[in-house]
Image (cartoon, coloured by chain):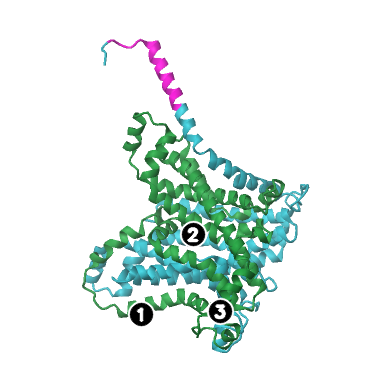
Chain colours: A cyan, B green
Amino acid sequence: MTTVPVPAPSRTSVARGRARMRLRRGLIAWAFLVPLLVLNVLVVLGPSIATVYYSFTDWSGIGPANFIGLDNYVNAVKDPAVRDALLHNAIWFVLFLSVPMALGLLGAYLLSQVKRFAMVFRVLYFIPYVTASVVNAALWKMLLSPDSGIGHYLGTHHAWLGDTATSLYSVNFVVDWHWWGFLAVIFFAAMQSVDPQLYDAAKVDGANKWQQFKSVTLPGIRPTTIFIFLMTIIWSLKAFDYIYIMTHGGPAGSSEVISTLMYSQAFNNYSAGYAAALGMSMTVIIGIVLAVYSFLRKKGWEE
Amino acid sequence: MTAVLTRDPVSTGKQHGTRRGPRRAYHFPSYLILVVLALFAVGPMVAMLFNAFKSNSQIGASPLAPPTSLSLHNFTTAWTEGGFATTMRNSVILVVGAVIGTTIVAGLAAFALSHLNVPGGGGFIAYLFLGSAMPVQLFVVPLFSLWTQLGLTDSLFGLMVIYWATEAPFATLLLRSFLLKVPRDFVEAARLDGASDLTIARRVILPMAWPGFLTVALIVGLAAWNEFFWAITFIHDPAKRPVSTSFLAFQDQYSTDWGLTSAAALFMLIPVVLLFIALQRRFVAGLTSGGLK
């Protein structure tokens, strides 16, 4: 406001004051993050770093741990139980990707086609997803039991969960059942943002419903589909609750996946060091998937 | 990373009806398939509802048929045998504690990450994203050991702290997306009036972003009510169990009595379904934005 030039010393002190001010503001801003940071370090980050260390030891879960180098990892690679579990994870991934995705896309597409009751259907499809895993599991244990439910009606009396040939597929079916409605709602939301003029143009070109779906809807929701695809890899690797509740990984390991195997190694076999190595391996695979995803996003593969 | 999912499916859904016009009047095949899918989704739940009113011999004779009378016998027996008075109380404590704690912790963090210039804030947000994608198998065992040493196993508070820590990253990211919609001018105006950051958070942000807080509260509450993994790992004392794990124990004990377990399952299910139907738009908007979880 004044035309008198400000003397040099005062200018640097102003700058210094501003720097101090900025530092103060930065510290205040970080102070708001302190509760979250403390909780995260205590519950997640600290124990995660401990897992890195314990994966190189023979720790039992309590007491001292001896450093044994890469033994746990070498044993994991040789362990037939790990190989079987990973194979089950792979089967799980294929089913968990295809079945809920197909049902979800079908439901979402039909929802986007109708004008009335779409919201009612959306609510009904979503209910299994908001229901507790223990409740859904109990419900399907009842329906899949040999003496009541569906088996009774069909007269097959097959023990779906008790047979080594069907246990993994049966649990996976239950998980698909509770999951597809969630995907339907996500795809439905994505389909709302597809430009309606594209449909009109396709219709002018004489495209039928299936052709419209294939060449307008699917390309329009591509980012969502890619996201779900990559997340499904991660979700499949993390699969735990329903398997633990419905079969405990059995019978005879027929539905064992990597996370249930890791859990029983840690809490039933007292091989916490070995379990830590399995947990580390899972994390590395998930890390790779996330890295690939962010790489693809940067490349603009989604567009 | 969740950007593709954060579109609000509700507000976009509303425009839909007017957009495509009344040209396609006949939707019978679409509705038929939609109804079949709806039966697939909720039909099994209806069967469970039926069985809760039937005796075991009635279920044995016709497992999927509607009940012939509305006997509440299964409900009263399940309530007392399953100790639901205790476990419901435990779960309510957990839900309320998890909601309050997570909303405060996440609210403070989300405020800083949306309206204060946090140096390195971008990296912190990336860390939150990454952290919520990591498997719990990465930290469960040392955490159990730590919690045992601190005397926090078999404790509702100990479990609650885990819920705060595991729910807060997701809650922070979701809340941040709501808080970003509060105009910066409001915050600046309050600051010029001499309000401290905490006052701004309480007096300006909270009243303006309450729908976001409600959404986060609903999702954290639902997660705490349904939660299974942490509860089964950290709570072994039957008197401290929440409904999820006590229901599982109950079901294992009465594994052949489907009427009883159906009634018990409904205790857990009905509050959720009623709340969900009442507030479904908020639930759906929040849950579909949390695709990374």
In the rendered image, the vertical position of residue A13 relative to residue B60, given as above or below:
above
Q: Which residue is mark 2?
A: A230
Region in magenta: A4-22
Q: Measured from the top left, where is residue B43 in percent x and y?
A: 47, 77
C-alpha gap between disc 2 and disc 3: 32 Å
Specify the principal SS of the magenta part. Answer: helix
Left or right placement of residue B138 versus residue A112 in this view: right
Does residue A284 appear anywhere in the picture? yes
Task: Mark 1: give few (<14), some (14-19) or many (20+) Cα within 10 Å.
Answer: few
Indicate the amino acid at tag 1: Leu
Task: Examine the image and state in which quarter residue B268 appears.
Answer: bottom right
In the rendered image, the vertical position of residue A68 relative to residue B61, given as above or below:
above
Task: Mark 2: give few (<14), some (14-19) or many (20+) Cα within 10 Å.
Answer: some
Indicate the amino acid at tag 3: Leu
* Chain ID of residue with mark 2: A
Residue B117 lies within the magenta run: no
In the rendered image, the vertical position of residue A109 relative to residue B8, given as above or below:
below
Of the image marks 2 and 3, the number of the one nearer the N terminus: 3
